[in-house]
Image: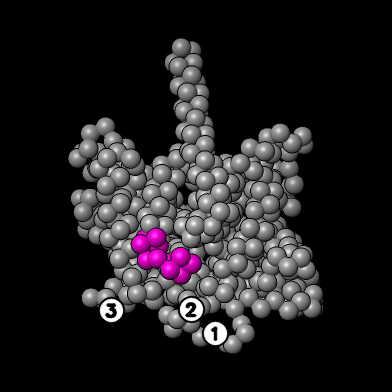
Amino acid sequence: MDMIIKYILGLGAAIFLPVIMIILGLAMKMKVKRAVIAGLTLGIAFTAMNVVLGFMFDAISPAATEVVKNTGLQLTAIDVGWSPMAAIAWAWPYALLLFPLQIGINLVMLGFKWTNCLNVDLWNVWGKIFIASMVTAVTGNLYLGFLAAAIQIILELLNADATREQTYRLCKIPGVACTHPMVLQAPFLWLLNKILDYIPGVSNINMNAEELKNKLGILGENSVMGFIIGALIAFAGGYDVKKILMIAMQVATALVLFPMAAKLFMQALAPIADATSSFMKSKFKGRDFYVGLDWPFLAGQPEIWVTAIILVPIELILAVGMSQMGMNNVIPLASIINVVVAVPAFIVTGGNLIRMIIISSIATPLYLAVATSFAPMITSMAIETHALQVNPGQFITWIQLEAPEFRWAMAHALNGEILGIATIVVYAIGFVWYLKSMKKMDAKIEENKKITRNGEISC
């Protein structure tokens, strides 16, 4: 049984999640044809997004590596990306126990009305396995590892509740929310965003990609922005003119294709979300249920990709500067396009591109510092589980640690370390404040809608 489940999961999200969605659709009384088409479309959407992302990564990552090499620095920890981390997580002996833990917590919270989110993103259960295995490695206590995973599961559901309306306003896909752990960095980014409210010259700027196009004309087009940014990164990597133009065109192509691929998510998810909402409402009167999903249904928003690409040179500069101060030992490589910070920044700022770039840049040192801190432990886990081969003297790590301050604080707080405990207390206070702030914002927007509707009726 263990081998069967691991084989299915090994097929990847593009196969695993469509199967889950088809089963969910049939359980929610969808017609077989509709459920199958929706599931297949979801698989196609994931595949298309991964193809475009891989295409852009193949263009930017080698150029970024050349930039680092040109500095002459010897950085011993290699950023290997999320796939090897998932392999390490699945190789953990207790990995499969996280499935019943996530499903059980979700059902209990639904039953007690602590959430209205049905999280069907079982593929990303590996993120809970990852934190459980890390905490177990740090503390030497398996039970604390499972406690950390349980806390992450609960916070993901509460966060989905808090961001659902904002997510709908931004992507216009009804009945879904993002339960990906990356959004757990939202409280920290929310605080940074609120601080910007008090900075002259920034507080009044509210510019999304569409407004950027209007202000900059041709320079604001996805294709042109992608071409310019790609060319600058390639130039910094020391490439010749031919290679610079090729990389520039690849990045421009990716920025144009991302929104096209993202439309497939809407086609796939809308009928499943509608069926799930209707079925659950028929069983639980007065409840407004929705489906929790992986982040790519937001990937069609150009602000995310503009921010992530602009962050590439910023990451490289910070990696070099922090290494000289002894705070970083990581070569940004597989995670150089850091959507993990861009997505929560997109949500908390409401798609304000300028603010996204600012707060993402401020948060980037956290990713480098925590990735450096966890490198020895991640390397040991890879060796112990036989998930990866690591050369002697070499370390592996992952820059996109998904809410790095939360993962670091959880591991060190449960290990009884004062700084870790203090950090997790501050995070908890910030999380509660952030949840209340999001609810107030939703209530205010809803009140404004009512006033507008009443005004239209009276006219």
Disc nearest the viewer among 2 and 3: 2
Specify start and end residues of the magenta stretch as a single range: 136-146
- Tag 3: residue type? Met
Q: Residues within 10 Å of mark 1 (few under 14, many from 20)?
A: some
Q: Is there any visible trace of residue 214 in the rendered image? A: yes
Residue placed under numbered mark 1 in the picture = 390
Residue placed under numbered mark 3 in the picture = 3
> Cα distance, mark 2 to mark 3?
20 Å
Residue at image position (79%, 78%) is: 72
50 vs 304: above or below: below
- Tag 2: residue type? Ala
Point out residue 386 in the picture as x, y percentages from the top left corner: 44, 83
- Residue 140 drawn in magenta: yes
Residue placed under numbered mark 2 in the picture = 382
Point out residue 189 in the picture as x, y percentages from the top left corner: 60, 46
Q: Is there any visible trace of residue 271 in the rendered image? A: no
Q: For the residues labelled 2 and 3, say whether their Cβ atoms are less than 8 Å apart.
A: no
Q: For the residues labelled 1 and 3, say whether their Cβ atoms are less than 8 Å apart.
A: no
Q: Residues within 10 Å of mark 3 (few under 14, many from 20)?
A: few
- Within the image, what quadrant is residue 391 found in? bottom right
Point out residue 128 in the picture as x, y percentages from the top left corner: 41, 61
> Cα distance, mark 2 to mark 1?
8 Å
The residue lying furthest to the top in this view is 458
Residue at image position (63%, 76%) is: 77
Q: Residues within 10 Å of mark 2 (few under 14, many from 20)?
A: many
Residue at image position (74%, 36%) is: 199
